Image (cartoon, rainbow, N blue to C red):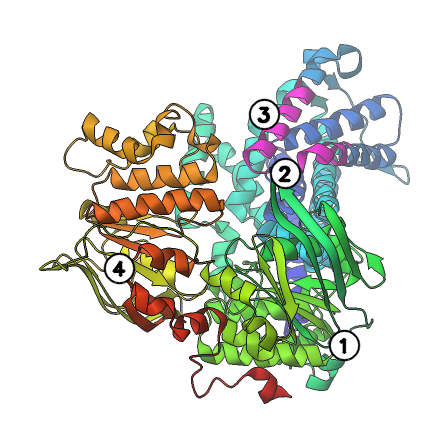
Amino acid sequence: MKLLLRTRTLDLTILALTVAAILSLGAVGGYTQFVIGLVAIWTILCVGLNVLFGLTGLVSLGQVGFFAIGAYAHAIQMQAGVSFWLALPLATALSAAVGALLAVPAVRMAGPFLAMVTIAFAFIVEHLAIEWRSLTGGQNGLMGFDMPGIFGFTFGETELIVLSIVLAGLSLLAYRALAASGWGMAMAALRDQEVAAGSLGFDPFVTKLTAFAIAAGAAGLAGGLFATLMQFIAPSNFMLSQSILFLFAVILGGAGTVLGPLAGAAIVVFLPEMLSGLAEYRLLFFGALLVAVLLIAPRGLVGTVAAFLPRYPDKTPPAPRDTVLEFIRPDTKSGLKVEGLGITFGGLKAVDGATFDARPGEVTAIIGPNGAGKTTLLNMVSGFYVPGAGRIETAGQDVAGWSMHATARLGVARTYQATRLFGALSAENNVIAGLPRGRPGAPFAALATTETRALARGLLALVGYAGDPGTPADDLPHVDRRLVEVARALALRPHVLLLDEPAAGLMQADKRALSEILRKLADRGIAVVLVEHDMEMVMGISDRIFAMDAGQPIAFDTPEAVRTNEKVIAAYLGEGTLDAPPRELDYVPGAMDRLITRKLCAGYGSADVLKEVDLRVGQGELVALLGANGAGKSTFLKTLSGLMAPTAGEIILEDQNIQGRPAHQIVERGLVLVPEGRQVFPDLTVAQNIELGAYKRKDQPDVSELEAILARFPRLRERMDSPAGLLSGGEQQMMAIARGLMAKPRLLLLDEPSLGLAPAMVEELYAILAELRDDGITILLVDQMATLALAVADRAYVLEQGRVVAQGSADELLGDEALIAAYLGGGTTEPDEIPMKEVVA
């Protein structure tokens, strides 16, 4: 009801403003009337641009081109004797058609590339108007158009301005209705998260093309009115600077707001008239005003004012639980069957021969170490990637190669590793966006009705969301973002639900609640496919588990069988076949530890990842930090290096407390991180990448240092002048380590150095690490392959769910059951962490 009242209030406001503008014409002179008419025409154009930019997030600097097409098309028809009432809609339709045609190549681009395409279009239109003299009159332009008439009455300038004001009011009402419709929801979804919008069934291409056509059509309509009001048009009326001013008006008024185009148009049109003596400084003044608005009121004038207006929460109750459970019951008993699925990236087989099935009513987990191909597999099933081989069968269809939106419309929903919510939409509107299954419906029919809000709130309640459903998604804490994303996926009424690490960053109580939810969803007949690194959770709720390693399937069986499978254990811990050279001399602890952490805690938002981690690294020691994916290893290294701020605890580097210091100061003190994924500068040469490692050193590196580093990494010597982006993965990893050594580190942090490398390259790399160890370089090593790390380490710590669960010498830990339990579960379950299948069954 409150939503209906807000909508009616806005509609009445637009109606009142329209009537007030018409009445004001009787109180002002002819020139002021003319300026009011220009404001109305600008408002129409800016409403269309607001659909494209404010609602869909696409930047166009070519709107003046559509404005010109509408003006010339209307003027040419009028001179040919066509009725105003026919010429105006035909000019509008022509502009919209040209906009749709331009959108075909343009919407495949983004950001500055899209802007450049639209700028080029504006230049083309301007020069056509100049050169096509036989049609446009060239620089002389066109003039003398008949005024419209109706029932024998011929309009004067005032009546034409009234018509423009009425059309401006109707355009504002149309925008309000469009923004509240399924089409508006689709456009807003694309603006915030295009990939997630596709996974809800929205066709990105069709939606963007529609937005382009609407914006072009509105510009064409404004152009036709402009030509009639001015009674003269020439190329000088349609310069590129006009496009910039159109966009400026939308931003100034408030992009994405209903009344923003009106406010922006009024300021941009009226202000030069008020400051007519400074006309030559108009663009300079507008530029300064834009900078001020972006700094002070980034949501525009209307958006900023709206933020201060009181908001009354909608009290719509959630739909009954039984209604929601019946709603999510799949309309088909089909599960998912994958046969021989594979994909190759640049010659590398990311997934090869994946074969498994997910039955309705079961939770099927996909596990494997980093780089195993789990997310790539989900991306193929959901339509994000086109597989190079194999079949994906669901609902009686082979959907391999289908687009994301087509797959979603069939009933395959998914969530993501990093949540992809529509940040500007509320929690409940995120869920409502999924209800149409990608079919937006009528362009002006409201999607967020009392019924759909009740259903969305019921879905949120079902997954355990207890917050305010009206909270914008960008303001939600991490755990609530996870829950809202699951609820949004359920809004599609899927028969297959793909979940990519839904428990990442959640606390134990939240993981337990999520586990119960997933079991309940499976009990409703949904085939739940779960990619997750928390092995306690996986083993507790899964019916069957599909294990992968380096893109290859290695097991598909019950949790009990997979937990003890030798191939699975080897995939997580390594084969244990690395022939790393032993220390030439036994390690003797120095007088002082190089690094000490005491009760170190860190996390993301309200989710704690590290929980009172105590660790020490001695001078000249190589210490390994082990644990499953999601245990907190990389978070620990980021916290040490200043890329994350700790929430509690101490970090002591050689008697200096460094927690909370910025990363560049920590590097100056000698703690250097070689990050996961190498993080090279691809366009710089190998030599330049290595030299950047010395950037924060107080002294200048000499040639002998570089020679010593190249002696360790002879592969790099012959590639010093090559761009780093052309190196192989192993060579890039060597270069990243060389860059770290160039900083003369007191402590070198290595994050997953073996990730994605071929076995021969891994052996060569670890031989180099052993040399660094023997040369007295202090190293803290994180690697997913535990046996590799233990082969070169002096000591090791094992992390599980952010806590240290085991520590000792490398030899002691190599056969420790706690190590296997940390990777595959089963050994450290706390008393309140009962396996979920036993709880829910």
Q: Earlier in the sequence, mark 3 or mark 4?
A: 3
Inspect the image, locate mark 1, and give the three-letter code of the amino acid beneath it.
Arg
Question: Looking at the picture, does residue 70 appear above or below residue 193?
Answer: above
**Residue 58, image x and y in percent?**
61, 42
SS category of the residue bearing label 4: loop
Residue tagged by mark 2? 42
- Quarter occupied by the C terminus: bottom right
Regarding residue 184, the answer to whether it shows in the image is no
Q: Earlier in the sequence, mark 2 or mark 3?
A: 2
Residue at x 43%, y 26% (from the top left corner)? 281
Residue tagged by mark 1? 329
Q: Earlier in the sequence, mark 4 or mark 2?
A: 2
Say few, some or many: other residues with alpha carbon within 10 Å of mark 3 (under 14 / 14 to 19 / 20 or more).
some
SS category of the residue bearing label 2: helix
- Can you tell which mark lies on residue 240? 3
Q: Earlier in the sequence, mark 4 or mark 1?
A: 1
The answer to the question of whether label 2 and label 3 lie on touching residues, with beta carbons closer than 8 A, is: no
Say few, some or many: other residues with alpha carbon within 10 Å of mark 1 (under 14 / 14 to 19 / 20 or more).
some
Regarding residue 661, the answer to whether it shows in the image is yes
Inspect the image, locate mark 3, and give the three-letter code of the amino acid beneath it.
Leu
Say few, some or many: other residues with alpha carbon within 10 Å of mark 4 (under 14 / 14 to 19 / 20 or more).
many
On whether residue 45 falls in the magenta region, the answer is no
